[in-house]
Image (cartoon, rainbow, N blue to C red):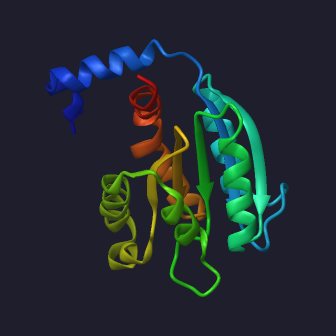
Amino acid sequence: MSDPAKSSPSVHQHKSQADKRGVIRCAVVTVSDSRTPETDISGQYLCEKITAESHQVIGYHIVKDEPKDISEILARLTESVMDAVIFNGGTGISGRDRTYDVIESRLDKRLPGFGELFRMLSYQDIGTAAMLSRACAGVYQNTVIISIPGSPNAVKLAWTKLIAPELKHMVWEILR
């Protein structure tokens, strides 16, 4: 499939400008009651991919799926010199999945298309279970906030199809 952005002069121009921005300063937050740095495949994957794109991982954290813990790390990271924070985990509908509720309530601007596209792409892999994902993205305190499921396949899908192609563009749009 061809890249639709190449057929849009304005998107191409914006992405060209965004490429001049340079290094994006990121944090990765894994929301889990059971993962450790040694078992956090998804968080490790994100850190590796961010670095491979020549961006900086300024922070990596694992927090419990507790609203207070998620709120505190979000506040702390957006008060620092962070361009983007990627949360993984806690986006489902179980009683313990609270990431979406906290993130969505804090966003200054929402990017509903992120969650819509994630679910559409996920549907191609897992079928109707994709509707159970509450992946979301937006802006909080002039920082790009992305929240995705924590499964390794979901993280890889989100990174390769949505985050990597648009991260610089999103940050550029906020700061221009």
Corner quadrant of residue 55: top right
Using the image as rendered, state which of residue 166 and residue 110 is in the foreground.
Answer: 110
Quarter in which the N terminus is drawn: top left
Task: Report x, y in % for residue 149.
Answer: 54, 64
Task: Report x, y in % for residue 36.
Answer: 84, 62
Using the image as rendered, state which of residue 41 and residue 94 is in the foreground.
Answer: 94
Corner quadrant of residue 30: bottom right
At 68% from the left edge and 47% from the top edge, which residue is drawn? 28
Q: Is residue 12 left or right of residue 142?
A: left
Using the image as rendered, state which of residue 147 and residue 132 is in the foreground.
Answer: 147
Q: Is residue 172 left or right of residue 79?
A: left
At 52% from the left edge and 76% from the top edge, which residue is drawn? 92
Task: Give the answer, above or below, for where 92 lies relative to 51.
Answer: below
Identity of the residue furthest to the top in this view: 20
At 53% from the left edge and 68% from the top edge, which residue is drawn? 100
At 47% from the left edge and 34% from the top edge, which residue is drawn? 167
Task: Give the answer, above or below, for where 4 lies relative to 125.
Answer: above
Quarter in which the C terminus is drawn: top left
Task: Give the answer, above or below, for where 144 lies relative to 81.
Answer: below
Task: Report x, y in % for residue 54.
Answer: 62, 22
Q: Is residue 27 left or right of residue 117?
A: right
Q: Is residue 36 left or right of residue 137?
A: right
Task: Report x, y in % for residue 80.
Answer: 71, 36
